[in-house]
Image (cartoon, grey):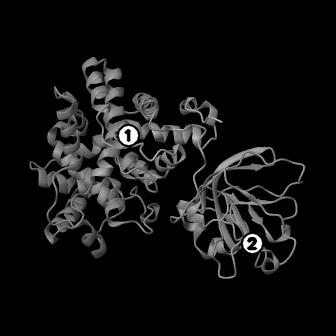
Amino acid sequence: MCGRRLPWADGGLVVPHPPTNAQGRHASCGPIIEKPRERKDPPGPVAGEPSLEKGPDFRGALIAFGSELRRGDIEIHLRSSGWREHGHHLDPAYNDVILHVVLDADGPVAPCLRRDGTVVPTLLLAPALRGPLAALPHDLTLAALGALPADECVARVTAANRATALALLDRAGDARLTAKAAQFEAAFTVASPGQALYTGILDALGYTRNRAPMVRLAGALPLAMLESRLSAGDARGTFRQAAALLLGVGGFLPLTPALVALDGFDADDSAAIERAWAELGAPWRETRLAPDEWYLARSRPANHPLRRLLGLAAMLARAGRSGLLAATLEGFGAEEAAVGLAECQAFLLGPPRDADPQGRFVGKDRAAEILVNVAVPFALAYASWSGDDRLAGAAAALWERTPPTGGNEVTRAVLARLGDPGLRLRTGRAQQGALHLGRHFCEQRRCYECPLARLAREG
């Protein structure tokens, strides 16, 4: 952990980064924050990662509120009014914030509410300072926020033990796979396997910010009801019907000109989808999702939930009369794992769309995420549930060949902590292992319980 105790702060206050300057720019420090306490009281276990993307300033902090330890995000403002002025009370991206830190109050400090209605406590820094901010000494040794190194790992990975580290990451990936398969098998007790698969795919298509509305959509439009209404005899007609139901229940119809431009459709396709919704959508008129349930701020065109739903509609069209479940498992029936992997990828990706500036509704990275997080664990769960040993073996063989994705903040942070520039995660299995260790050990500071702790630093 990288934190600085400000020498001029009464009570030994520790802050995630120093107060902003007169221009509102952040001078950086480490990702630690505590409430003011007496100097004889040692710091509690607290942590967090600085974020340079849109959203809270620090993510995954552990903060001691008295004797209670909470995990969540931290948002920093120069003035207490910044929370509402910046619209955070309406933004679901801030629903994990557990502490609002401000330099000073510009008027009465009103309760700080998240979008989900939770009250967030506000910590004022000015009362803890020994004088006006402008009179306090400036520390030239402070690093820029983006230059802060990741926390150092207790393990040391080098060329000599790199193979051991990769084997440990593979096993951690297997642990994550086993847990996901168990979640699917548990879901079979309350829903059909097809519905569990469909919900898992929608969840994965939601990425991070739109997972909740995607899951709500799966409940509002169950797979059995959706597939029963796909009566067109050709792939294009099936796609239009599936798109109409998914977009209609999702609250995206009628299509605006901006949405038409986003999906790359011609006028015939757009009109056909809206006609299909008019014909099929009556049962969902009162239960469709509201447009404001989706997180759309600064969403890249390729990540827009409308395009993700069209990607699922395209999968349903490729599945045809066999259905989503059978089509997803078809690749696991190949004799060779490499052939099965190619078939699974082809089903999830689909052919490129020449008129689409994005190429496909679902990109290669998202298809790889669905493969490792949904298709393979679902296949293992379905094999266990149905007693299909052949399917279990095929899923295990395909798992070892899954490709990596572009990664995320967690996997990149794990690699940075390990400190070996030659360490490459060449499979989705190893990448899932890094994600498992990051979530269950790094973020919780369970360093010496981590499987990689055996590669301990010397000296």
343 with respect to 402 (left or right): left
Residues tagged 2 and 1 counted as in contact (Cβ below 8 A)? no
Mark 2 or mark 1, earlier in chain: 2
Measure how far apart labels 2 and 1 are at the Cα level.
Answer: 42 Å
Q: Amino acid at mark 1?
A: Asn
Does any portion of residue 200 appear in the rendered image? yes
Quarter location, residue 98: bottom right
Q: Which residue is mark 2?
A: 103
Quarter location, residue 454: top right
Q: Position of residue 121 (x, y in %)?
A: 73, 60
Tell me the SS state at disc 1: helix
Observer-nearest of 208 and 280: 208
Question: Dot 2: within a 10 Å radius of its alpha carbon, few (fewer than 14), some, or many (20 or more) residues?
Answer: many
- Say if 71 sits above or below 253 in the image: above
Q: Determine the residue positioned at 63% across, 53% down.
A: 48
Question: Dot 1: within a 10 Å radius of its alpha carbon, few (fewer than 14), some, or many (20 or more) residues?
Answer: many
Q: Position of residue 34 (x, y in %)?
A: 76, 55
196 with respect to 446 (left or right): left
User: In front: mark 2 or mark 1?
Assistant: 2
Quarter location, residue 181: top left
Does any portion of residue 193 appear in the rendered image? no
Q: Position of residue 32 (x, y in %)?
A: 70, 55
The mark total stands at 2
Observer-nearest of 209 and 27: 27
Marker disc for residue 78: none
Tell me the SS state at disc 2: strand
Q: Which residue is mark 1?
A: 373
Q: Position of residue 451 (x, y in %)?
A: 54, 30
Q: Amino acid at mark 2?
A: Leu
Q: Determine the residue positioned at 55% across, 32% down.
A: 455
